[in-house]
Image (cartoon, rainbow, N blue to C red):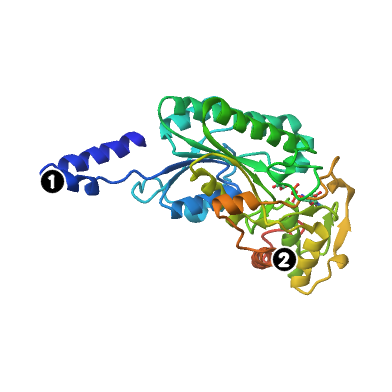
Amino acid sequence: MASSDSASAAGSESNNGPLAPSSIPAAVPERRKVALITGITGQDGSYLTEFLLGKGYEVHGLIRRSSNFNTARLDHLYVDPHNSSKARMKLHYADLSDASSLRRWVDVLLPDEVYNLAAQSHVAVSFEIPDYTADVVATGALRLLEAVRSTSSSGKPIRYYQAGSSEMFGSTPPPQSESSPFHPRSPYAAAKVAAHWYTVNYREAYGLFACNGILFNHESPRRGENFVTRKITRAVGRIRVGLQTKLFLGNLSAARDWGFAGDYVEAMWLMLQQDEPGDYVVATEESHTVQEFLEAAFGYVGLDWKDHVVIDKRYFRPAEVDSLKGDSSKARKVLGWKPKVGFQELVKMMVDQDIELAKREKVLVDAGYIDSQQQP
Ligand SMILES: C[C@H]1O[C@H](OP(=O)(O)OP(=O)(O)OC[C@H]2O[C@@H](n3cnc4c(=O)[nH]c(N)nc43)[C@H](O)[C@@H]2O)[C@@H](O)[C@@H](O)C1=O
């Protein structure tokens, strides 16, 4: 990548040989900023990719090998790499559990910015696969930091973003800010705390431009279907078109500070544009219980959630995070960031999209192509 860019720059300089020196810089194409994203196939990865492409970046994403393609959230951004003049998003195989693959791509791509968004990000699942979660979330971040440090030390400055989580606060009472103590309540959250401190340590030990974004829950129509907001809005859509009647859930009294993922990726980018690296809480500063989300989502389409929700013990966690509400005053002041989408608007956006999805699903069910029992 870097070599082909410098080759084209050198070519245009020689073509402009007879021109006055002052006109040469205008003829030399500026190198696009290069971003490398782990977790590009996820909700945040897709929004961040859109955002960075809009800013003129060349975006490279690391993806895990899987027997099924997992790139649906990126399909609308994909341009065949054979069309090299138009393709500004490129995907490469790598894995946070494979240090050599991380090292290779950082070395080859020489990114200006690295965003570490990849994770086993489901809190409940982290109790089932704690070892894997720790390997990917904690040690994976360390492996990537090492790759960034190594390439940076050979003279290429790289800025690093670590996706932290409000789950790190766990049982610390709200409002939670950058100075609130961490008290993780799951293997996922404990691994995120380790990744947070690895990032701080690489900043302090090696002078790396490394930032932690401590993001509170952020949702969207692209949210994975087994997180509670999307599970609810999918069910609302399916109940509305007659594909489902019941929704099985766990603890309805947990409270979360839910924002829109599209807003939050801007905060990630802003952190890497500052003069100094730092850690920032990103949150709406408004908290709602799962029950309030249910009321808003079912109420929006004229349904009563109590007619459909059944409590199922299997969705309770061995340890719960009861109440999260961020204090994002530092991000608002230093980054000039604030959320654009509020709670009610977020709920409506997700329900509207999931009603459309359910209508398409219904066509397939009615035609006998899929079974309506295949619930998300
Ligand atoms: C910031 C943070 O945000 C997310 O973690 P999360 O807050 O655990 O998100 P969730 O949607 O899985 O649960 C929210 C609440 O909802 C309760 N709940 C009830 N019934 C069901 C239920 O049936 N399914 C689920 N998933 N949750 C349920 C559940 O017990 C919990 O109290 C991840 O992105 C994570 O990666 C991250 O970093």
Instruction: Please report the residue visible at 89 percent of the width from the left and 48 percent of the height from the top.
Output: 313
Q: Is residue 361 visible?
A: no
Instruction: Please report the residue visible at 85 percent of the width from the left and 55 percent of the height from the top.
Output: 253
Q: Are marks 1 and 2 in contact (CB under 8 Å)?
A: no
Q: Is residue 140 left or right of residue 327?
A: left
- Secondary-structure class at tag 2: helix
Instruction: Please report the residue visible at 23 percent of the width from the left and 38 percent of the height from the top.
Output: 10
Which residue is the site of mark 1? 20
Which residue is the site of mark 2? 237
Task: State the image coordinates of residue 175 (x, y, percent, origin top left).
Answer: 76, 50
Which residue occupies the extreme bottom position in the image?
302
Task: State the image coordinates of residue 121 (x, y, percent, origin top left).
Answer: 69, 42
Q: Earlier in the sequence, mark 1 or mark 2?
A: 1
Q: How many marks?
A: 2
Task: State the image coordinates of residue 3 (x, y, percent, origin top left).
Answer: 32, 34
Which residue occupies the extreme left position in the image?
18
Q: Nearer the viewer, residue 345 or 20?
A: 20
Q: Which mark is residue 101?
A: none
User: Taking 290 as reference, is 352 above or below it?
Assistant: below
Q: Is mark 2 within 8 Å of ligand 1?
A: no
Query: Which of the 4 quarters of the picture holds residue 112?
Result: top left
User: Taking 198 as reference, is 266 above or below it?
Assistant: below
Q: Nearer the viewer, residue 261 or 157?
A: 157
